[in-house]
Image (spheres, rainbow, N blue to C red):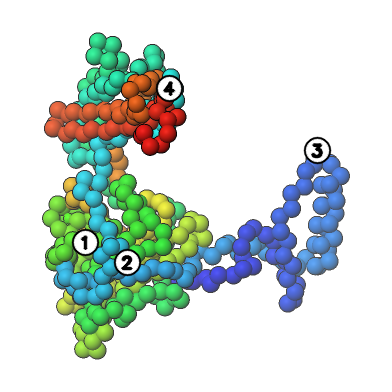
Amino acid sequence: MDFQSDDALSRGPFLLIQWGSARIKVVPYTVTVNRFTGRKFLVVLAAWLVLSLAFGGAPIAAAPPPPRFVTVPNSIRVLAVWHNGNIVGQLQPSETQQAPAGDARLISKTASAASVATNGTLHYSIAITNATPITQTFQVTDSLPAGLSYITNTVTGGFVYSSAINSLITTTRELNAFYGNVITTTGAAPYIEIFGKPNVENICQDHPFPDCDDNAITVALPEPFRYFGVEYSTITLDSNGFVMPGSPLSHELDTDSQNQLLPDPSAPNNVIAPFWDELDLKGTNAADTGGGDWLYAAVHDGGTNADYLVVEWHNAQKEGDAGTSYRFQVWVQFQAEHITFAYDTPAFTGDTSSATVGFENSDGTLGASYLYNGTGLVPGAGTELGLNAVFDTAQLGFDARAQHNLRGCSSITNTANISGASGASDIAAASVHIFGPCDFLPIINR
Ligand SMILES: [Ca+2]
Ligand SMILES: [Ca+2]
Ligand SMILES: [Ca+2]
């Protein structure tokens, strides 16, 4: 595939006029005209005609587009290297990061301020998300604590205030099950090889991987990304055609060569798989029979104007089959929840009947497979796929007035409880400090 190096001349829109070896760059200039026949317009038009005549009809070329794709110097650091689920290289445990269990909360609650004066008004917001693979019915109860009084006619999202129990309650509500799929996406970065480009790490060759088979590498990124709503600054790359946000548990990668129908709660979890199969790359041992390279780089993509980690499997070989070759990438956008797969033309020389294309969350309960062991769709040559995770949510809210209790420094903690017919439950609390007399006492008395 074509690769354009960075060209300072190509930044920003402009016209490029070329005559022989001479080039004139015309940058945009905005002229305000009150009417179409305004004097300024005529001046610009006259200048344009003079220029055109002077160049004798020389072609006036539109500016080339900004570079679609540039590998950039980066500060990606290796934290650990793995073989068959065991660490075989350096490890900086304080910097590794594991995915939290239950990475999507059912309910969360926020107050409009961290502190408020007596008689001040607070707005409470409550968000409920169905992060389960089944439809859930919910009821929310928010009992107001002492010092907090509901302000009439401020409920939103289905809350009802009951003065008898001084609480906000909902009727029973229903939220749809989580839905996920892998979709053909437009506008995502295409497959452009990073193999052979500057600033690219060739993983098999640069680490103690004599066989480069069933290996993984955990790296710290210069910028974080999000996955299932969780922010990560580390990611693990596995040679068998997938990545995992965060760092794996010990032995979690023991079975990394055995692709799963995603989601699957068995290890490994948090798998994002552009093409998970029993791959065998070319290691540092000259006698290694595997084939292909495995690479990563930080990339700036001019097309989407964003920065990414790109991981590439370049002519990767299937274990025991020297006639196969697979070329694909995963793009992880920094500072966003946006992960896409890109496939070369052709993407696969060899069969695709034992691979998984898909994704799952940190406990393997949510996700989707686009392809699994021949069932589903084979990614088309030159296409891009995106991860799509849809959660049904509800938003509730109300206003309340805070009163200091006069018995000393106080904070009010307001708690919302959610209970579901399917057994799901959760609690969220928001604490607010109420300014009162104690805030003006000597600090020793606090
Ligand atoms: Ca799994
Ligand atoms: Ca393998
Ligand atoms: Ca190998």
Q: Mark 4 or mark 2, which is nearer to you?
A: 4
Residue type, numbered disc 3 = Arg
Residue type, numbered disc 4 = Thr
Task: Give residue 248's mark.
Answer: 1
- Tell whether 43 sits left or right of 429: right
Residue picked out by circle 2: 219
* Earlier sequence position, callout 1 versus callout 4: 4
Q: Position of residue 311 (x, y in %)?
A: 34, 67
Disc 1 CB within 8 Å of nearest ligand 1 atom:
no
Secondary structure category for the residue under label 2: strand
Residue picked out by circle 3: 35
Tell me: residue 155, above or below residue 200.
above
Q: Mark 1 or mark 3, which is nearer to you?
A: 1
Q: Position of residue 388 (x, y in %)?
A: 32, 47
Quadrant housing the N terminus:
bottom left
| Residue at 62%, 59% in the rendered image | 12
Whether residue 194 appears in this view of the structure is yes
Neighbor class of circle 3 (other Cα within 10 Å; few <14, some 14-19, many 20+) is few
Secondary structure category for the residue under label 4: loop
Picture quarter containing residue 114? Answer: top left
Q: CA distance from mark 1 to mark 4?
A: 49 Å
| Residue at 32%, 46% in the rendered image | 229
Residue type, numbered disc 1 = Pro
- Tell whether 418 sits left or right of 147: left
Tell me: residue 441, above or below residue 371.
above
Seen from the viewer's position, the closer of residues 72 and 16 is: 72
Residue picked out by circle 4: 118
Q: CA distance from mark 1 to mark 3?
A: 66 Å
Residue extending furthest top?
164
Picture quarter containing residue 141? Answer: top left
Q: CA distance from mark 2 to mark 3?
A: 59 Å
